[in-house]
């Protein structure tokens, strides 16, 4: 069956160092699908069309040039294909008809976009089914914060919640909520990155030792719960904290906490990172997966230029994700 991923209203960027493209690539790998970045007529040649609303989708439609003829044509292609062959990725299908109806009086709106057409699009959207990565029949799940795609092994589904801290996960017992299908054989937990960036250098913060101790206790409970029978075996592994970039890198305000992009100097956060890595390395119950070690010791600005997402952001660039990296990622405490 031929499958394609496309953006229903906005383009999927082609830039290889975009975190947004990284999410699309992950889906393409799992679905064995092509990517049509601009929703061209070529999508009609496929059996199934998957809609990627963007890794940063927040429930609203941003059209910088307005609801133009191009937007009308994109949705018309989807309407012609029919809702039975269109699947919404990650989210219940948004009501794009309602979004576009709000723009009917705007001068930039295509004359082809009418209330009747918007009503038809709304009906189509209500009929499109949704799909999450956790519903796929894969044998690995990676779970954690927005850095999780970088630590996911090849073929892994990803379940992420942006802004999730390790301390918050433990305080709210969120590891108790992880459920995996019978086909899952491995689980990667990607947590702690935000704790290092914003919290652990604060004088009132929990210590790295206490945080790691609580983490390991929660992981033991999780492992024992998942491996509830002699025939059930789920390997639980942990992600090392990401390397620390230079202090001058600009990041979007969505990455701020208490109006700052980080707390503590690079050197202080670097020490916290290495200390956590040593604490996790010392235990042998859970493998700890890490990016290549040289990235932790190199100059922070050089690291950001080479290995981080294009422009300002806190994420690794997709070519250096675990599943794509030409340099081998290694376990700190295995082998």
Image: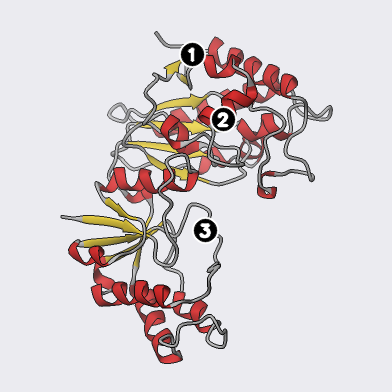
Residue 57: mark in rendering: 3
Residue 179 visible at all: no
Alpha carbon separation for disc pair 3 and 1: 35 Å
Residue 96's x, y, as percent? 45, 74
The image shows residue 94, relative to residue 16, as above or below, that is: below
Residue 177's x, y, as percent? 51, 44
Report the residue marked by disc 1. 332
**Identity of the residue drawn at 66% across and 47% down:** 252
Secondary structure type for disc 2: helix
Report the residue marked by disc 2. 305
Residue 272's x, y, as percent? 69, 20
Around disc 1, counting alpha carbons within 10 Å, would you say few (fewer than 14), some (14 to 19), or many (20 or more)? many
Colour pattern: secondary structure
The image shows residue 40, relative to residue 56, as above or below, that is: below
Alpha carbon separation for disc pair 2 and 1: 25 Å
Mark nearer the viewer, 2 or 3? 2
Q: Quadrant of residue 49?
A: bottom left
């Amino acid at each position: 069956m031929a499958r394609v991923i496309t953006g229903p209203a906005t383009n999927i960027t082609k830039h290889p160092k975009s975190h947004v493209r990284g999410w699309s690539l992950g889906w393409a790998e799992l679905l064995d699908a092509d990517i049509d970045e601009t929703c061209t007529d070529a999508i009609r040649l496929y059996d199934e069309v998957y809609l990627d609303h963007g890794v940063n989708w927040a429930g609203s439609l941003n059209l910088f040039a307005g609801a133009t003829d191009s937007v009308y044509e994109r949705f018309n292609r989807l309407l012609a294909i029919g809702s039975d062959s269109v699947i919404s990725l990650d989210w219940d299908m948004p009501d794009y008809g309602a979004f576009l109806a709000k723009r009917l009086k705007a001068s930039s709106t295509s004359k082809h976009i009418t209330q009747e057409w918007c009503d038809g699009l709304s009906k189509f959207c209500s009929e499109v089914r949704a799909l999450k990565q956790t519903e796929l029949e894969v044998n690995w799940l990676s779970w954690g914060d927005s850095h999780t795609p970088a630590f996911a092994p090849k073929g892994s589904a990803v379940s992420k919640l942006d802004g999730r801290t390790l301390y918050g996960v433990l305080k709210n017992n969120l590891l108790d909520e992880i459920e995996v299908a019978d086909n899952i054989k491995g689980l990667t937990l990607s947590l702690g990155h935000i704790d290092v960036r914003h919290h652990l250098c604060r004088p009132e913060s929990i210590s790295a030792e206490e945080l790691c101790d609580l983490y390991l206790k929660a992981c033991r409970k999780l492992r024992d719960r998942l491996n509830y029978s002699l025939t059930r075996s789920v390997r639980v592994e942990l992600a090392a904290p990401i390397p620390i970039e230079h202090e001058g890198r600009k990041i979007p305000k969505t990455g701020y906490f208490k109006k700052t992009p980080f707390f503590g100097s690079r050197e202080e956060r670097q020490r916290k990172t290495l200390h956590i890595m040593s604490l996790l390395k010392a235990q042998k119950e859970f493998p700890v997966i890490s990016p290549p070690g040289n990235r932790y010791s190199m100059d922070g600005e050089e690291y950001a230029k080479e290995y981080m997402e294009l422009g300002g952001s806190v994420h690794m660039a997709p070519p250096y994700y675990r599943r794509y990296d030409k340099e081998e990622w290694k376990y700190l405490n295995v082998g």
